[in-house]
Image (cartoon, rainbow, N blue to C red):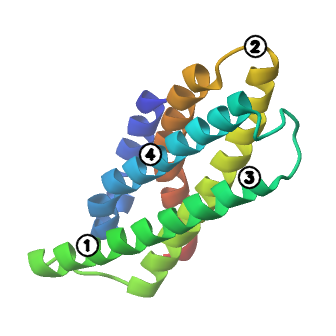
Amino acid sequence: MGLISGTLLSFNENLLYTVPIMLLILPALNSLIGDISTVLVSRLTTHLYLGTLQPKVQRSERLKEDFYGLLITLLLSTIVLIILGFVVSLSSGIQIVSPFIIIFILCFTILLIFAIMFILSFVSAIVLFKRGMDPNNFLIPFITSLADFLTPLFLIIFILIFI
């Protein structure tokens, strides 16, 4: 996945140079989404082993609490990341083109990837748990790699669409 992600980034190098703040924020964004996804998988696995979450694909209060808690954490972290990105950009003289569109693209990307990761992690954790496997062993590396691939992919797609 890392190879595909790197290839995707190198093929769109010129596009990313047109929006230099994205180059500045991308590594932290990748790390943020990967970290939140890892926490999500760990929480799901813990709930399954403790029995606080039934191994069925259904809504539960525990799942809602985890979803909202991680979503709030993700949004607050994204806000801090955007502020830091803009401060570093302005202090280093990098021109920021369409700041509101950039903020929209970053937030939309984060929310979309979080939704994909949440659903995929939840369903996969239940399937693996039912088969007697530890979801942490399989999902944490997979979800982290997938986040590293999807983040630049969606950023590039949304830059092409909105800028």
User: Residue 109 in the image: x percent, y percent?
Assistant: 55, 63
Instruction: Determine which of the numbered discs, if any, sits on residue 35 in the image.
Output: 4
Task: Please tell me in which quadrant of the rendered image residue 130 appears.
Answer: top right
Q: Mark 1 and 4 residues: CB-CB less than 8 Å, in contact?
A: no
Which mark is in front, 2 or 1? 2
For disc 3, the neighbor class at 10 Å (few under 14, some 14 to 19, many from 20) is: few
Instruction: Determine which of the numbered discs, if any, sits on residue 84 in the image.
Output: 1
SS label for mark 3: helix
Mark 3 belongs to which amino acid? Arg
Residue projecting furthest to the top: 132
Which mark is in front, 2 or 4? 2
Mark yes or no: residue 159 visible: no
For disc 1, the neighbor class at 10 Å (few under 14, some 14 to 19, many from 20) is: some
SS label for mark 2: loop
Q: CA distance from mark 2 to mark 1?
A: 44 Å
Q: Which residue is mark 3?
A: 62
Task: Please tell me in which quadrant of the rendered image residue 78 appears.
Answer: bottom left
Mark 4 belongs to which amino acid? Asp
Query: If you read the primary sequence from the N terminus, does the residue marked by circle 3 or circle 2 appear first?
Result: 3
Q: Which residue is mark 2?
A: 132
Mark 2 belongs to which amino acid? Gly
